[in-house]
Amino acid sequence: MAKMIIKGGRLIDPLNKIDKKADVLINEGRVERVEDRVNAKNAEVIDASGMVVCPGLVDMHVHLREPGREDEETIQTGCKAAIAGGITSIACMPNTQPVNDHESVCSSIIEKAAEVGLADVYPIGAISKGLEGKSLSEMAHLAEAGAVAFSDDGKTVMDSNLLRRAFEYANSLGKPLIVHCEDENLSDAGQINESYISTVLGLKGIPAEAEEFIIARDISLAKLSGARVHIAHVSTSGSVSLIREAKKHDLPVTAEVTPHHLFLDEEMLTDYDTNLKVNPPLRSKKDTEALVKGLRDGTIDAIATDHAPHAAFEKEKEFIYAPFGMVGLETMLPLCITNLDMNLSTLIEKLTVNPAKILDIKAGNLSQGSRADILIFNNNAKVEVDSSNFFSMSKNTPYNGMKLKGKIESVIKKGKVVFKEGKFVE
Amino acid sequence: MSKSLLLNEEQLDRALTRISHEILERNSGAKNIVLIGLQSRGVFLAKRLASKIINIEKIEVPVGSLDIGLYRDDISTGGAKELKKTEIGFDITDKSVVLVDDVLFTGRTIRAAMDALIDYGRPSQVQLAVLVDRGHRELPIRPDYIGKNIPTSLAQKVEVKLKEENNEDSVYLGEDA
Amino acid sequence: MPLETKHLLAIKNLSSQDINTILETADSLQEVSTRDIKKVPTLRGRTIVNLFLEPSTRTRTSFELAAKRLSADTVGISKSSSAVIKGESLKDTAKTLGAYNVDAVVIRHPAPGAAAYLADYMDASIINAGDGAHEHPTQALLDLFTANQHLGSLKGKKIAIIGDIYHSRVARSNILAFSKMGAKVLVVGPPGLIPKEVEKMGAQVSYDFDEVIPEVDIIYMLRIQLERQQQNLFLSVREYVKRYGLNSKRLARAKDCVVVMHPGPMNRGIEISAEVADMAKNLVTDQVSSGVAVRMAVLYLLVGGVSGLG
C-alpha cells in the first residue's frame, strides 16, 4: 500500500495533546509520523490547508437495525451514514431482532461490517436475555465474540439485584455496562418531558426524576460492585450533578450526551413533530445549559448520537403511536461545531478518544502505529442539512433544512480515502 | 368622491308616513298585518312604520327582524358574513307579511328573505316595502311600497343613514361603487 | 369577518376575537333550533365527515345535528366501521377523505395532536372534537356560551373546574377559554390528577373543594372516568366523593347565584349527587342545546366561508 501525506492542516489529536499545524504520514494503513513538516518520496499528498485533521470520530451509541428491520437501516447503510458524518468507529446497540444476546448475532454483525468494510462496528451485547430484564445473557460468550460492552439499550433493568449481578459479572470480564436510566414506573408510558409543555399538549410526561433516580441507583451499584458504568444519553441537570458528584468520589462512572439533548429542548414540541420524540425526552432549556456545562467541566465524557433510524411510516403516526428516536450520524459534527462554544480540541476529545477509552477500543487517536482512521473537515464551511441526501435509509431528523457550520471534506479509513466531497470513493 | 343628498330627514319621514298609509289602504286596515324588517336597517324602518301605524290606526302591528345570511346565494363565493339575529316572535301563517328593507337593488336579498320566511310559516301574502328603489334588478321582484325611486348607475352607491345608528336620517347618492 | 383560522384545532391558538365571533354567530344561530322547520339551506352541497375514532354520543350527535340543520351532507365514520380497525394509518385515512373532496372533517381521536395531524394532510377544514387529553375546543366554546347566557360578561367571574384535570381535554380547553374571556380559573382535584405547572396555563390550583366553593360563580364538575382508578392515580370512589363530590350540602355553602356545569354524561352519585344533578342551577341541558348552536356557528364560519373544493 502506498504512502500518503496529509499536508498543511490543523492537526488535532487530543490523546497526544496535539493541536497545531502539522502533517501526517501514513504508511501501510497506519500512522507513521506526525510532524510539523513531513516529506516522503512516492507518497500521495492530500492538501489539508485550511482544514482540520483529526482522528476519525467514534460514536458509541448507534442503532443499526440489522438484523430485523433492514427496511430502516442495514449495517451497510448505517456504516455509510457514519462515514459520511466523519465517524469511523461505531458501537451498536443490541436491540435488534433477534436481540444481540447471543454470540451468533454478535459474530454475524461483525462479519457483515467487515464485508462492508467502511466503519468499524463494535457490537454491544445485551445485559439480559431478550432485553427482558429477567435473566442475564451469556456475557462471556458475547465478549468472546466481540461485544465491547453490555447494555439493555432503551430499557432499564428494573430488578436492582439482577443488575448488581450483571455489574459484577461484566466487571470480571473487564467490560463496562452502558445503562439507559429511566424508572419505568415513574415514567409510566410518558411521551415527553413532564412540565408545562406536556400539560399543554395533553401528553403524558416523563419527570426528570425518572432518570435521576436510576442514575443514583446505578452509581450506587457501581460503588457496590466496583464495575465500570457508563450512563447513556444524560438529559437532565440533576443527572449531571449526580455524575459530577460520583466522579468527585472517583467512582468508575462515565457519561455521554447526544447532540439533540444539548441543542434541542422541549419548547420545540409545540406541533407534535414526531421527529422530536426521543427517549430520554427533550428537556428544558435549563437542562440543556447544565448539559453543556457538564460537557465543559468533564462530567460528561463523550458525545454520542443515539442514532435511531425509523421508517417514515412509523414516524408519520400520531405522536403517541410513533416510536422514539432520531437519526444523527450525518449531523453530529456540524451540530456540535455550530452550537457548542467550546475549544475545538476539547470537542474532538469528546468525539474520539474519550468514547474509545470507555469502550476500550483501538480508535480515536493518531499515535504512531495506530490505524490511520482520519477525518478532514472544514471548520467554517457552511452546510445545509438535506435529509434526502442522507446515506442512512431513514430520514427521521428534525434538522432538515437547517444551515450549519462544519463540512466533512474527506474520510480516510485504514489509510485509504473512502469518502470525499460528499461521495464515496470507489 | 362626490355625494348628493337624495332625502333629508323631513323627506324621509314623509315617505315613511306615506308608506304606512299605503300599507293600511292596501290591506284594508292593520288587523292582519305583520312587519318584518331585514337586518339591520330594515328593522329600524319596520319599527318606525309600526309606530306610525299605531298613530293612525291605534293598532299595534307585530314587528320582527330577519337576517338573511343563512339564505344567501353567494355563500360559497362571498364567504361567511356576520350574522345578526332573526327574531320573529309571532306566527306568520295566514298573515299579510310586509317585508321592509332600506334599498332595493338586485332583488337577491328579497329572494333570500322570502325563502327564509317560508321556513317560519305560510303567510297569506308577502308584500315588500323599501325606502329606496335604485333599479338594476337581477330577479323578477317588484316592491309594493316605495319611498323614492332613484335611477342609478351601477357605479353609484346609495347610502342610507338612520338615527338609530348614525345620528341622522338621510339618503345620499355617491359615486364610489 | 370570517375567522382568522381555517381549522378549529385548539382554544390555545384561537384569538379572543375569533372566540367572540363564534359566540356571536352562535347567538344568532340558536334561533334555528327553536323553529318548526329546524333547517336552513346555508351549507347545501357541503360535505362534512364526522370521524369519531373514540366512543362519543353527545359530541357526535351535536355535530351531526349542527351540520344537518345547516343542510350539509354528513357522513359518520366510527372506529368499528372504518378501515382504522383494519390497520389503516391516520395519514391514509386523511388522504382517502381528501380524495372525496369533503369540506370539513370533525375528528375525535384518542391521540393528542391528532386533529393538527389531520390538518397537515388535508385541504379540508379540520374541527377538533377532542384529541386525547389535549383539547376539546367546541366544548369550551359551548361552555363559554352557556356561562355567558347565565352570567353575562365573564370578566372577573370565578370558575372552579373540579376533578381529573390531568386526563381532561375539557379542563385544558376551558382553562384557556375562560381565561381568555377574563374569568379567573381555579382547578380543584386530588394532587395526582393535577397536571404539572398547570398554573402557567392560567389556572390556580387547589386541592380543597370546600375551601374554594364559597367564592366561585361557576362550579364546573368534570366527569370522573372510573377506569382511571385502576391506574393508582385515583382515590377510591368513596374517598373521592367525600372530598370532591358535589352534593347539596356542599352546594349550600356556595353563592346563591352560583351555576353548576358539567360536560356530561354525569355520573350521578359520584362527582355529582342526584339531587344536584336535577337542580335548576345545573346548566347541563343548556350546555347541550348551546352545543348545537355553537357547532353550527363553527361549521358556518369555517365551511360557509371558503369551499374545500376551491
Image (cartoon, coloured by chain):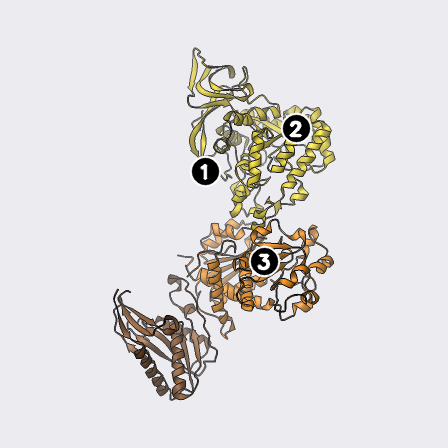
Colour of the chain lettered C:
orange
| Residue C185 tag number | 3
Please tell me in which quadrant of the rendered image residue B2 appears.
bottom left
- Residue annotated with mark 1: A402
Q: Does residue B151 appear anywhere in the picture? A: yes
| Residue A248 tag number | 2
Inspect the image, locate mark 3, and give the three-letter code of the amino acid beneath it: Val
What residue lies at 71% left-to-right and 60% top-to-bottom?
C241
Colour of the chain lettered B:
brown
Inspect the image, locate mark 1, and give the three-letter code of the amino acid beneath it: Met
Please tell me in which quadrant of the rendered image residue C158 appears.
bottom right
Chain ID for yellow: A
Residue at mark 2 shares a chain with residue at mark 1: yes
Residues under numbered marks 3 and 1 in contact, where contact means CB atoms less than 8 Å apart: no
- Kindly report the distance in space between the C-alpha atoms of the residues bearing marks 3 and 1: 41 Å
Nearer mark to the viewer, of 3 and 1: 3
- Kindly report the distance in space between the C-alpha atoms of the residues bearing marks 3 and 2: 48 Å
Q: Nearer the viewer, residue A191 or A125?
A: A191
Residue A186, placed above or below residue A408: below
Residue A69, placed above or below residue C137: above
Residues under numbered marks 3 and 2 in contact, where contact means CB atoms less than 8 Å apart: no
